[in-house]
Every structure is written in structure tokens, then in C-alpha cells.
Image (cartoon, rainbow, N blue to C red):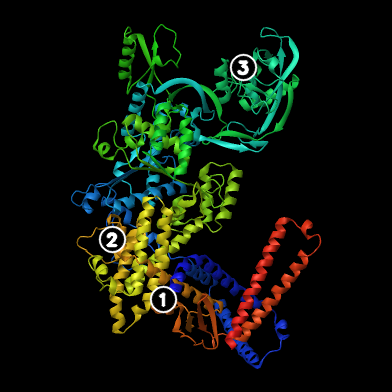
């Protein structure tokens, strides 16, 4: 028995090797087929035996009959309509598309009494269910009390999550589909555990994105700008557009199966949200956390607004690059470094030059018009004598000081740097340290200001060229060369971002950021995967104050009022003493009077700030604004703080960190206790999803399928220039030459969750999703087959699992094995969900359904289903109960991931307690390990696994000799390990069923296998033989293998001659030599395989 135990332990370790051997056997079949390519002339060179001649004559006769049939078929086809034949052929190959045609009103339960279609059809399966779920209130948190009763003293757990609100501007893409799939899977799992579950949906007003879309629409349809309409009319136009287009995203979310509580849906510009946003600003302003300041911002001249960092695309340029920029007819050159000289003068008051010059370089020559200093490193000996002196500006009346600062890298370029404090972030800080002048030389619309002398009123990039030409005329120009650089582009307008000095509102983030860091370090807030914690620390420990002003009309208008005292000069708008915040003008005036009690209302004017708040501000308070804050609502009491925040890792700082900071500040506690960050979706080639690449995919196009022609047509909605359209069409044709096949919602969700283990990025191959559609078909066929056979209409399941538990000892071994596999799958799913490891869940369920249930257990049961003797029927009674349990629990396990097909099939199965069981699978108890632990039998599983190894060996051997399914063979087992032999004996019925065996005989000591057998080894102590005598033509196989061997030996000889040449090591590149060595190993291994095959054939003769 010890040998048997050792073998069981060895099986797991040998799995990989066995897979490799299986692949080698498949390759061997391909090699055997190559023998057919030899010509008849070569065959006649060999002397043929009488039996060979006889067989060839028979084959010739068969060939002649076949040719006659083919000719007859061609004649028939010529007489018929050819297009019809092609249509029928295509119909056979394509998956069936069956529609649900029963008359079911929206919200009514689907008719499940009608017959199931022959094959899985997503459109049939997904029809009607969602509307019924929603109408029945299954998505509401209160549903738990109705269908999941608590034990005495038990407290119901809660699961609360807010959906990251997608922008209202357009449609969802696969990135949103990933987010919604993960969140819905987790939500459905918690709901099926009986938790009070709330997943709250929302939609973001998307300030800049929405305003840009409507402005373009206004220009296209009416040839007007927002300024032509005025603020109030333009905002009304946006609300009109939102009411027309806003439902498309909700439709997509429902098609994906998102089980949100739609009655609690929030829009970040609805009345509840507006009140919460304004109150948050007012309270934070009163606490001194929001203040007014003049600093550099990311300015988009095209949008005429500041934008957030996340809306800036930092585009890396390798060198000289021509780009199309809004407002310019010709492309503009970037990726160059221009060097020029400033001439040193004797003093600040003097224009007399000393004869010295200092050379600087810049990628933005036009900004030299705003230079107010030249900076060098204090330790740079080349410039020490110049520090404190001045240079003269060649184009404006200005002397520029030469200063020293540690910021300069003395070893880079000339070691001297031009300082433009009003247009560069580093220069801005330097300017503050040295008290430099801040001169704005580019205005809001991208034109040069009056400070620029002869270049005033020029467009900035026109001024760039003019400045360089003027430098050349004055003899100050040195050179222009290519350089690598990063160009900031506005993601909305594709305009080049200008750092601009603006008075804006800022949030003081220092203390709030420190609290957010502590929350993670103290483990009060958990981040999954935990490697993102370092990003969290890095961002928040160096967190800058947050600019929240946006120069837009669409959004939350900042509730701040500037106090202007009549008869006095207007105060600096960064003086916070002259700003008050309030919900309306009357309340603002009350605060102004309290601020200046010596004044009366008629002595003051209040100017309402024109700007709106950054969209991320309203998103930052989303977890508590959705609950009705600042009102003390029942939802706020019950559902804040929440449980989980799930989103992409790319907005960890822009959104997640701000929610944490503002939640603690405004409500006194964290908005959630866990952050789960999913990966970012890229295309199959690893490229970022981009409209210009044509690789952005609407999830509905994957669900329903789409032709290549219609994919190309969608590009018309992307506002791309003709060259980008051409590039995108080419990309779509390469990736989807036949369009995207219909995959269905369940396959899409399952695939996206299966991808979650890839880490930071997901390279999504849409065709892999199609593979999961085939998996859905496997579930469909397995359940349908079971219901038509073992679980027919007369079958009534026992009312609980207790029957199987009490009768476990009476079950057949394979019944016990299947229950053990079910127990293990339940355990893996439970641990996977709790660890947010959805990949382990999808893998376990895929293996359970495809391999354990379909490939083995149901196949094993089929002979029993068809048996007519009473003994077989009696054995099947318990197996029916096991099969029903495995289908019932298997559907429940997969339901969070595949809600539609699981509901469809679950409704067709009989119920254990039809009068009291929940009406839907989505509110049926999710299987827990404690209820299935009794079924776990690892020893039995190891025995079955050993039998599966034997099955795989026999199948490979049969495949090696191209035996068909109809060909049944005798099997012989010779083992010197008694334990191993007994394990195979215990499951000999399984082995015969799965290998199309006629009989199996275990050879006793001293007894040899019959002549004419081929064999394979299960271990060094066990051989398995199959009888091939009379089935395989030994001589013919020998000829084929010998010819193949000759060809291989010739290839080896030629390769040896090439590798033996004297200059081989120096003439042939290393990569080619490595390939040749691999090829030599491959050829040698192939010869070894053929020799093994020839030995097998010799053994069959003896």
C-alpha cells in the first residue's frame, strides 16, 4: 500500500509533465499525418507485401466510388441555387439566435413553462428577467428582512457601496463594464448571504466634458456660442440635452445586470446634491479649510478654464513633432530646444554691456518675454562672479537679475536657467523664494499680453516663431535641436496646457491628508491590493492644496460673495477677509454685515463668484450626499458610513483620497472601511483605449455583437480628423476582421472578473469573451440534458441536504466524489469572495462545471440513464439526488457572476420546498462551506484523480492511433503496486465509460498481455495496454513512421553540417544560433518519439 500512497502524492507533481506529454502525442499525430504528403513514386520504390497490395486494391476501389459520389454531388449542386447552399452552411456554423416570444408584460415574471431552446441564446435568456427583479424590489436593502430570517440574537450584517458615478455625457465603455461587473458580483453575493445590501447608483454632471459637448452641439446646429445665449439660457440648454441623453447610461447599466437600488439614484446636480455641495463649501470655508489664493493652474485656452490634473494628458515626445492645435490652421512644432543668449550689463540702471553673455535654453521661446531672472547653481564656478549682476532683455524695457538657487542642475545644458515665474511651476516657487516679479505674458485665450511689446496680441505659437526670428536678427540666437519632452495636452480640447497665474479657491489638504495616511497605517482603512498603499502614502504625504475653481457655466456655482465697499478702492480678490459664503445672497449679506458691523447694507455690494466648483468636489462628498446629508435622514443613519469603495486605481488620489478626507472632515468618520482597486483595461495589444485608435468598445457591442461596418460607422461620433479616422478603421479591421461576435451579458461579466488577477493593467482580448459564451452553452446543455433524463418531470428532490448526509455511506463512489468536488468549490468561492479574489472564484466555477460535472460526472451517469435493468435504476435514484444538488448549488454559486443564465436554468429546476423557497435565485441563500464540509473526501478525490490519469493515458494512446469514438478496445492493466491496482479497480466502470473500453482486465502476477497491444505507462510500477490487433494496420503505420524518420534525420544532418562550419560562431548571430540549437533539440526529440512508436508497432506484431 505504501507504493500506492507514494503514487497518490506523486500525481499532483506529475500533472504538468502529463500535459506536456499529451501535447507531444498531439504533435506526434500531426507528424504521422505528414507521411501522407509523400508521392506515389516514392512509395513504389519500396517492395510491397501481398497483404499491402491487396489493401491498396481495396483502397483504390473505395477511392473510385468516392470520386463517383463527388461527381454526382457536384451535378446536384449545379442544379440547385448556390446562394441558398452557402446560407445554410453559414447557418449551421453560427450559434443559434433564439428570441423569447412569449407575451410577458414589462415587470411580469418570465414564462418558464415553455420548452428550453436547443442551444444557449443570450437574447432569449436575458429577456424579461431584469424588469421582474426590479419590480419585485429584489435590489432594495429591505428585501433581506423578507427572505432571510435571522436566528435569535443574530444581528444582520450590512453591505453598502456607492457606484462611482459615470459621466452623464455619453456611453459606457469596457472600463465601466469591468467596474460594474465587479461591483454587481460583490453586491449579489452579499445579498445572497442575507446581508442588508445597498448599491447606490449615481451620475456625474461632468462639468467640462458636458459643457464642451453642448457647446459643440450649439455651434453645429445654431452656429452660436454660449456667450451668444448667456449663462442662464446656456445652462437651460444643457439640462435639455441631459434630459434627452441621460437615460442611455442607465440603460447600459441595466443591460450589464447592475442590481442597483434605482429609487436611490443620485445625479450630482439634483436638488439633494446641490444642497450638500453648497453646505460642504460653506462649512469648510468657515473653518478656514477653503481659502482664496493666486497661484499657477492648468489653463486650457480653448476651454477658457482651469482644469484638474486628471484632465491633462502628459504626452511624451521623442523629438521634433508636428501637432494640430485648436485655433491654428497649420500644425505646430514641438520637441525642440532653443538656445539663446542674454547680454550682461554693468548695473541695473545701466545699458552698457560688459561683453559677457549667458546662454539659456527653452522649449517655449515665447515665454522669455516674461523672464524676470536667470538662475545658476550657487556652487557653479563659471557663474559665481555674475551672481547679483543683471542682463538686459532684448525686447522689453526690463533688467533681469542673475540669481543663485539650489534648484539648478549645474551639469545640465549650460547650467543657467531662465526664470518665468508666471508661466512655470518650478519658476513660480523660485520666484516666491527670491521675491521676483510675476509677469503674465499669455492671456486667457492664448494671445500675448501688452507686456510683450512688439509681440503683443499675437497668438502664442505665432509669437514663438516671431521671437526666434527676432533673436536671430539681434545675434542672440544660438541653436535649435531636437529634445525629448513631455507636452501637457487638455484631454477635452487637445489644446496645449498653459501654466497660468490665477486667483482661485483652494482646499487646505495638509491636515486632512495626514488623517487619511494615518487611517491606512492604523489599518482602519484597508486598500486591496495592498501594493497601492505606497502610492497612497506617496501622494498624500506630499499633498498640495487643491484648486477647486473652474471657469465654467455648467456645474455648482461657488457660493462665495466678494464684499465691495462703496466709495473705496476694490480690495485684492485674494484677501479672504472680503469673502463670505452662503446659500443665497440674503444670507451672504447677513454675514457681510457681521464681518463689517460699522457698515450698512446699502454701503456694500456683493459680487457672486462667476466660477463653478471642480467636478471632483461634488464627487468627493458622494458617499454621504447620496444619503441626504446635511439632513439627518434615516438613510444617513443606516447607510453611512458604507462598507466598500470599488474603482480603478487611476483615480486613487483624484477621487478616493478626497472622499476619505472630506468624509472624515464633514461627518467625523471614514466613508468606507475597504478600498478595492481594479486594473485598467487595455486592448489585446496592451494599448490604452483611445478613440483615435478605434479600440474603445461599447459593452453592448460585445453583448449583442456588431459588424465591422457598424464599428467603423461609430467612429463618426468621435470628432476625429480624417487621418485619425483612417488609422482607427485600420485598427478595427486588424482586431475585428469579422466584427465582434454576440457574447451575451453573462459571458462578458464572467470574462471581466476572470481578468482581475492581471494586476495594474488588463490586456483584454474580446474573442476570449466568446469562449465564455461557449461555457454558457455548456451549462445550458448540462442542465437541459439532466432535466430530459435523470431529472425528468416526475423527479421530486428531497426537501433538504440532510438526506444525502445521512445516506452518504450508501452512495456510489462517483456520487461521493462529485459531492466532494462540490464541497471544495463552495469553499474556494467563499474564500475567494471574502478576499476579493474573483479570479479564483471564476477558475473554480469553470473547472467545476466544465470538468467535474460535465466532462466526468454526467458522462459517467449516461450509461445508467439509458440502462433498463432494475439494479441500475435503483442505483440511479441516489445519483439523481446528487445530480440535482450539484446543479442547484452550482447555479447558486455562479449566480452573482452570471445572473441571467443562472436564473433561467434555476427556474426550470424543481424546488425542494416549492411553497416556501424564495421566488428568485438572486435572493436565495448562497452556499456556505459549513453546510458542505461533510462531503469533503480528499482521499477519494486522489483515487479518482489517479483514475483520471489512467483515462488520459488511454485516450492519448487511442488518439495516437486515430481510433474513433465508435471503436471499442479491450484494456489490460499490469501493476506490481497492489494499492494502485485496487484504486483502478474501484473505478474501472469510470475508466471504461470514459475511454470507450469494451472490457478491462487486471493481469495477475506472471500473466502477460495478449499479442497485438500498444501500451502506455502510468508509473514505473504500472502499465496499461489496449488491444489494437485487427484495428490498426501495423505495416502501413511502420512505413509512414519510417519515412517521417528519414526526413527528420536528413534535417538533423543538414543542421549539423551548418553548425560545424568553422566560422559558424562568428558569422551567425547569437539569436539564430540559439534558434538552431532549439531546432536540433526538437528534431532529436521527434526522432525519439518515432522510435518509441516503431517499438510499439513491433510489440504489436509479437
Question: Depth check: 649 or 612 in front?
Answer: 649
Q: Position of residue 717 (x, y in %)?
A: 50, 44
| Disc 1 secondary structure class | helix
Q: CA distance from mark 1 to mark 3?
A: 89 Å
| Disc 2 secondary structure class | helix
In the picture of the structure, the residue carrying the numbered disc 3 is 372
Corner quadrant of residue 261: top left
Q: CA distance from mark 2 to mark 3?
A: 77 Å
Frontmost of labels 2 and 1 is 1
What label sits on residue 983 in the rendered view?
A: 1
Question: Depth check: 581 or 513 in front?
Answer: 513
Name the residue: 70% across, 80% down. 39
What label sits on residue 931 in the rendered view?
A: 2
Query: Badges 2 and 1: C-beta atoms under 8 Å apart?
Result: no
Residue 173 visible in image: no
Frontmost of labels 2 and 3 is 2
Q: Earlier in the sequence, mark 2 or mark 3?
A: 3
Q: Residues within 10 Å of mark 1 (few under 14, many from 20)?
A: some
Amino acid at each position: 500500500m505504501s507504493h500506492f500512497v507514494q503514487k497518490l502524492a506523486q500525481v499532483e507533481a506529475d500533472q504538468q509533465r502529463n500535459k506536456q506529454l499529451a501535447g507531444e502525442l498531439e504533435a506526434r499525430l500531426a507528424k504521422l499525418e505528414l507521411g501522407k504528403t509523400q508521392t506515389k513514386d516514392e512509395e513504389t520504390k519500396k517492395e510491397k507485401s501481398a497483404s499491402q497490395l491487396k489493401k491498396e486494391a481495396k483502397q483504390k476501389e473505395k477511392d473510385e466510388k468516392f470520386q463517383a459520389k463527388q461527381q454526382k454531388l457536384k451535378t446536384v449542386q449545379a442544379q440547385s441555387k448556390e446562394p441558398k447552399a452557402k446560407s445554410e452552411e453559414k447557418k449551421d456554423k453560427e450559434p443559434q439566435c433564439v428570441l423569447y416570444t412569449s407575451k410577458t408584460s414589462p415587470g411580469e415574471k418570465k414564462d418558464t413553462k415553455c420548452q428550453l431552446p436547443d442551444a444557449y441564446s443570450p437574447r432569449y435568456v436575458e429577456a424579461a428577467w431584469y424588469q421582474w427583479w426590479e419590480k419585485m424590489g429584489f435590489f432594495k436593502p429591505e428585501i433581506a428582512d423578507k427572505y432571510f430570517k435571522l436566528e435569535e440574537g443574530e444581528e444582520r450584517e450590512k453591505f453598502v457601496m456607492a457606484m462611482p458615478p459615470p459621466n452623464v455625457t455619453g456611453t459606457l465603455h469596457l472600463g465601466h463594464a469591468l467596474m460594474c461587473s465587479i461591483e454587481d458580483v460583490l453586491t449579489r453575493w452579499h445579498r445572497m448571504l442575507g446581508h442588508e445590501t445597498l448599491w447606490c447608483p449615481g451620475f456625474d454632471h461632468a462639468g467640462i466634458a458636458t459643457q464642451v459637448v453642448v457647446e459643440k452641439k450649439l455651434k453645429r446646429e445654431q452656429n452660436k456660442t454660449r456667450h451668444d445665449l448667456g449663462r442662464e439660457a446656456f445652462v437651460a440648454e444643457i439640462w435639455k440635452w441631459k434630459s434627452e441623453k441621460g437615460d442611455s447610461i442607465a440603460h447600459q447599466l441595466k443591460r450589464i445586470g447592475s442590481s442597483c437600488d434605482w429609487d436611490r439614484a443620485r445625479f450630482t446636480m439634483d436638488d439633494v446634491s446641490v444642497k450638500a455641495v453648497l453646505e460642504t463649501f460653506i462649512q469648510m470655508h468657515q473653518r478656514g479649510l477653503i481659502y482664496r489664493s493666486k497661484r499657477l493652474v492648468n489653463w486650457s485656452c480653448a476651454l477658457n478654464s482651469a482644469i484638474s490634473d486628471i484632465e491633462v494628458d502628459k504626452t511624451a515626445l521623442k523629438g521634433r513633432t508636428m501637432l494640430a492645435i485648436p485655433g491654428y490652421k497649420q500644425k505646430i512644432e514641438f520637441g525642440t530646444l532653443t538656445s539663446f543668449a542674454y547680454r550682461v550689463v554693468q548695473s541695473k540702471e545701466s545699458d552698457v554691456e560688459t561683453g559677457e553673455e549667458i546662454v539659456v535654453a527653452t522649449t517655449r521661446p515665447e515665454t522669455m518675454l516674461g523672464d524676470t531672472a536667470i538662475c545658476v547653481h550657487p556652487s557653479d564656478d563659471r557663474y559665481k562672479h555674475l551672481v547679483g549682476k543683471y542682463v538686459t532683455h532684448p525686447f522689453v524695457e526690463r533688467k533681469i537679475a542673475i540669481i543663485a538657487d539650489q534648484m539648478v542642475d549645474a551639469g545640465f545644458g549650460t547650467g543657467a536657467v531662465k526664470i518665468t515665474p508666471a508661466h512655470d511651476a518650478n519658476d513660480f516657487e523660485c520666484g516666491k523664494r527670491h521675491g521676483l516679479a510675476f509677469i503674465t505674458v499669455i492671456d486667457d485665450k492664448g494671445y500675448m499680453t501688452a507686456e510683450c511689446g512688439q509681440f503683443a496680441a499675437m497668438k502664442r505659437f505665432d509669437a514663438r516663431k516671431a521671437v526666434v526670428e527676432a533673436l536671430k536678427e539681434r545675434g542672440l540666437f544660438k541653436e535649435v535641436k531636437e529634445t525629448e519632452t513631455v507636452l501637457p495636452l487638455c484631454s477635452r480640447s487637445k489644446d496645449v496646457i498653459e501654466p497660468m497665474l490665477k486667483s482661485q479657491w483652494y482646499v487646505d489638504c495638509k491636515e486632512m491628508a495626514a488623517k487619511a495616511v494615518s487611517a491606512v497605517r492604523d489599518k482602519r482603512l484597508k486598500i486591496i491590493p495592498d501594493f497601492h498603499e505606497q502610492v497612497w502614502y506617496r501622494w498624500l504625504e506630499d499633498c498640495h492644496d487643491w484648486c477647486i475653481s473652474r471657469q465654467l457655466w455648467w456645474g455648482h456655482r461657488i457660493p462665495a460673495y466678494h464684499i465691495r465697499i462703496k466709495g473705496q478702492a476694490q480690495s485684492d480678490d485674494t484677501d479672504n477677509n472680503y469673502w463670505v459664503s452662503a446659500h443665497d445672497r440674503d444670507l451672504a449679506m447677513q454675514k457681510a454685515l457681521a464681518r463689517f458691523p460699522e457698515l450698512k447694507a446699502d454701503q456694500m455690494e456683493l459680487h457672486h463668484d462667476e466660477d463653478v466648483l471642480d467636478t471632483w468636489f461634488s464627487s468627493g462628498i458622494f458617499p454621504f450626499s447620496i444619503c441626504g446629508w446635511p439632513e439627518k435622514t434615516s438613510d444617513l443613519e443606516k447607510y453611512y458610513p458604507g462598507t466598500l469603495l470599488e474603482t480603478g486605481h487611476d483615480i486613487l488620489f483624484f477621487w478616493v483620497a478626497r472622499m476619505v478626507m472630506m468624509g472624515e472632515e464633514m461627518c467625523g468618520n471614514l466613508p468606507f472601511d475597504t478600498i478595492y482597486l481594479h486594473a485598467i483595461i487595455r486592448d489585446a495589444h496592451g494599448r490604452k483605449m483611445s478613440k483615435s485608435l478605434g479600440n474603445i468598445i461599447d459593452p453592448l457591442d460585445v453583448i449583442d455583437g456588431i459588424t465591422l461596418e457598424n464599428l467603423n460607422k461609430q467612429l463618426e461620433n468621435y470628432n476625429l480628423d480624417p487621418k485619425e479616422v483612417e488609422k482607427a478603421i485600420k485598427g478595427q479591421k486588424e482586431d475585428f476582421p469579422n466584427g465582434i461576435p454576440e457574447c451575451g451579458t453573462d459571458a462578458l461579466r464572467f470574462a471581466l472578473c476572470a481578468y482581475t488577477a492581471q494586476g495594474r493593467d488588463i490586456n483584454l482580448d474580446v474573442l476570449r469573451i466568446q469562449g465564455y459564451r461557449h461555457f454558457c452553452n455548456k451549462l445550458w446543455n448540462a442542465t437541459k440534458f439532466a432535466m430530459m433524463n435523470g431529472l425528468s418531470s416526475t423527479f421530486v428532490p428531497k426537501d433538504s441536504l440532510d438526506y444525502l448526509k445521512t445516506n452518504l455511506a450508501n452512495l456510489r463512489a462517483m456520487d461521493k466524489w462529485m459531492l466532494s468536488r462540490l464541497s471544495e468549490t463552495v469553499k474556494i468561492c467563499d474564500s475567494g469572495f471574502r478576499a476579493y479574489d474573483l479570479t479564483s472564484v471564476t477558475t473554480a466555477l469553470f473547472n467545476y462545471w466544465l470538468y467535474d460535472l460535465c466532462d466526468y460526472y454526467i458522462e459517467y451517469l449516461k450509461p445508467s440513464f439509458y440502462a433498463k435493468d432494475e439494479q441500475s435504476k435503483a442505483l440511479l435514484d441516489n445519483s439523481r439526488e446528487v445530480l440535482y444538488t450539484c446543479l442547484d448549488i452550482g447555479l447558486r454559486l455562479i449566480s452573482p457572476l452570471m445572473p441571467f443564465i443562472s436564473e433561467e436554468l434555476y427556474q426550470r429546476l424543481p424546488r425542494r420546498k416549492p411553497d416556501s423557497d424564495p421566488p428568485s435565485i438572486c435572493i436565495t441563500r448562497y452556499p456556505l462551506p459549513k453546510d458542505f464540509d461533510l462531503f469533503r473526501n480528499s482521499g477519494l478525490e486522489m483515487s479518482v484523480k489517479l483514475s483520471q490519469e489512467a483515462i488520459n493515458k488511454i485516450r492519448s494512446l487511442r488518439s495516437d492511433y486515430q481510433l474513433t469514438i465508435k471503436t471499442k478496445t479491450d484494456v489490460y492493466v499490469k501493476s506490481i503496486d497492489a494499492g494502485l491496482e485496487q484504486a483502478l479497480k474501484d473505478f474501472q466502470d469510470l475508466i471504461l465509460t470514459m475511454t470507450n473500453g469494451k472490457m478491462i482486465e487486471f493481469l495477475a502476477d506472471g500473466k502477460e498481455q495478449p499479442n497485438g497491444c500498444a501500451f502506455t505507462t502510468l508509473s514505473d510500477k504500472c502499465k496499461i495496454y489496449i488491444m489494437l490487433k485487427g484495428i490498426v494496420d501495423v505495416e502501413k503505420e511502420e512505413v509512414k513512421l519510417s519515412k517521417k524518420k528519414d526526413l527528420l534525420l536528413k534535417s538533423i544532418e543538414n543542421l549539423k553540417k551548418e553548425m560545424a562550419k568553422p566560422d559558424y560562431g562568428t558569422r551567425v548571430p547569437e539569436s539564430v544560433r540559439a534558434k538552431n540549437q532549439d531546432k536540433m533539440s526538437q528534431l532529436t526529440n521527434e526522432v525519439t518519439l518515432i522510435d518509441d512508436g516503431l517499438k510499439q508497432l513491433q510489440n504489436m506484431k509479437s
